[in-house]
Amino acid sequence: MSAGPVYLDCNATTPMEPAVAEVVRRFFEEEYGNEGSRTHAFGARAKEAVQKAREQIAALVDAKPEEVIFTSGATESNNLAILGLAQWGRQHGKTHIISTRIEHKAVLEPIDHLAKEGFEVDLVGPDKQGRVETEKVIRLLRPTTMLVSVMHANNETGVIQPIGELSEALAHHPAWFHVDAAQTFGKLVAELKHPRIDLISASGHKIYGPKGIGVLVVRHRGKQKVPITPLTFGGGQEHGLRPGTLPVPLIVGLGKATELASKDHAAREVKCREFREKFLNTLGPLQPKIHGEMGRVLPHTVNASFPGLSAEEVMLRLKDVVAVSNGSACTSASYQPSHVLKAMHLGKEEMVGAVRFSWSHLTPEPKWQEMGKKLRG
C-alpha cells in the first residue's frame, strides 16, 4: 500500500527501472566520454556502450544494429519517418498517405503539414471499440501510396491495432509501412518483429527508461534502404539522418531498459493483468463505461467514464488516492474532447467523463476500498 496518491498515468511516462537509473548515472558521472572522440579510452568506451545499446534495441525487433537511429523520442522519430519521405515521394509521384484518425498528434500533425504541401491523405476511422479495420486501410491503397502509418496501440484507450494483419496485407504493395510503437515497444514484442514493418518509432520513457531518448528503427528491404532524408543537418551522426552529439547516458539507459523488457515482458504483463482484475473489481459496482473491447486492450490501460461524473470531478475526487489523466499527456491540459474518443463516436457525456488509468509492473496497489468510496461520493 502507498501512503500518498498512487501514480496511474504510466501511458504518459513510466518510472525508471532502478537498474536503468544506475547505468544512466554512471555514464553521466563516470563514463562521460563523447562517443565521437577517437583519440582516447573515454571516447572508445562511450562508442562501445552505444553500439551495445544498438544491439540490445535491434534484438528486440529482429532488426540489425545499423538500422537503429537514435532520436530524442517517438515524436521526433515520427516526424523523421513521415516528413523524411516527402522528398522521395515527390520525386517518384508517390504523394498519397494513409493513416488513422486515432493517431497521436506526433503523427497527425506531420501528415497534416504534408497535406498542406499537396500530398493526398486518407485517415481511417475506428469502430466504436476504437479499433481500425485492416480491410478499410487496404481498400485505400493506390499505386501512388507512399506511406501507411498506423499506431500499434492507442495511448488514450489502450486499444491494440491490427499491426500483424496489416503487415501481411501489405506484403505485395510497395508503400512504406510505419508503426508508432510508443505504447507497445518492449511490451507487445512479437508483432514488431515482422519484417514488413519498415519504420518503428519508440520512446525510452515509455519502457522504464530515461526521458529525452528514443529510436526510429529503419529496416532495409533486402538491399533497398528506406529513402529518408534528414530534417536537420551538421555532423553526420546516425548515418546523416540525425546529426548531433549522441547523448550516451540516455542511449545506454534505453539499451538497458530494452534488454530488461526483452527478458521480463511476459512476467510484467502477468503483474499488469492481476492489477487490472483488482481495478475492474473495484470499479464494477459503479457501472462505468469502459472504452475499448476486452481482450483487445493493453493489459495496463483502462479508459472509462462514470455515470453522472465529468473527468474533472473524477480526478478531483481521486486526487488523494491516485494520480490519473483525462487523455493524452500532450493534450490533457486543454480540456477539449479527445480526437480519439470523437473518432469512436462516443456520446458527449461519455467523452466529457472519460478518464485514463494506466499502470505498470512497478505500480503499488492503491487503497482499493477508499478509491471506490471516493468515486461513489
Image (cartoon, rainbow, N blue to C red):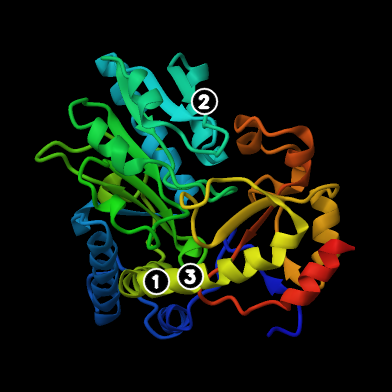
Q: Which mark is residue 167?
A: none
Query: Is any part of residue 187 visible from this angle?
Result: yes
Q: Is residue 93 left or right of residue 186?
A: left
Q: Is residue 294 left or right of residue 175?
A: right
The residue that disc 3 covers is 208
Q: Position of residue 47 (x, y in %)?
A: 26, 70
> Where the C terminus falls, by quadrant?
bottom right
Q: Residue at x 44, y 42 (%)?
A: 151
Q: Residue at x 45, y 13 (%)?
A: 118
User: The disc labelled 1 sits on which kind of residue?
Assistant: Ala
Badge 2: few (under 14), some or many (20 or more) residues near its Cα, within 10 Å? few
Badge 3: few (under 14), some or many (20 or more) residues near its Cα, within 10 Å? many
Compare residues 43 and 205 and report the one nearer the observer: 205
Q: Which mark is residue 257?
A: 1
* Gap in angstroms between the C-alphas marked 1 and 3: 6 Å
Q: Are marks 1 and 3 in contact (CB under 8 Å)?
A: yes
The residue that disc 2 covers is 113
Could you tell which of marks 2 and 1 lies nearer the N-terminus? 2
Q: Position of residue 46 (x, y in %)?
A: 30, 74
Q: Is residue 274 above or below residue 84?
A: below
Q: Are marks 2 and 3 in contact (CB under 8 Å)?
A: no
Name the secondary structure under disc 2: helix
Residue, far left: 223
* Gap in angstroms between the C-alphas marked 2 and 3: 32 Å
Q: Residue at x 58, y 75 (%)?
A: 363
Q: Is residue 263 above or below residue 131?
A: below
**Closer to us: mark 2 or mark 1?**
1
Residue 148 placement: quadrant: top left
User: The disc labelled 3 sits on which kind of residue?
Assistant: Tyr
Q: Is residue 185 above or below residue 163?
A: below
Name the secondary structure under disc 1: helix
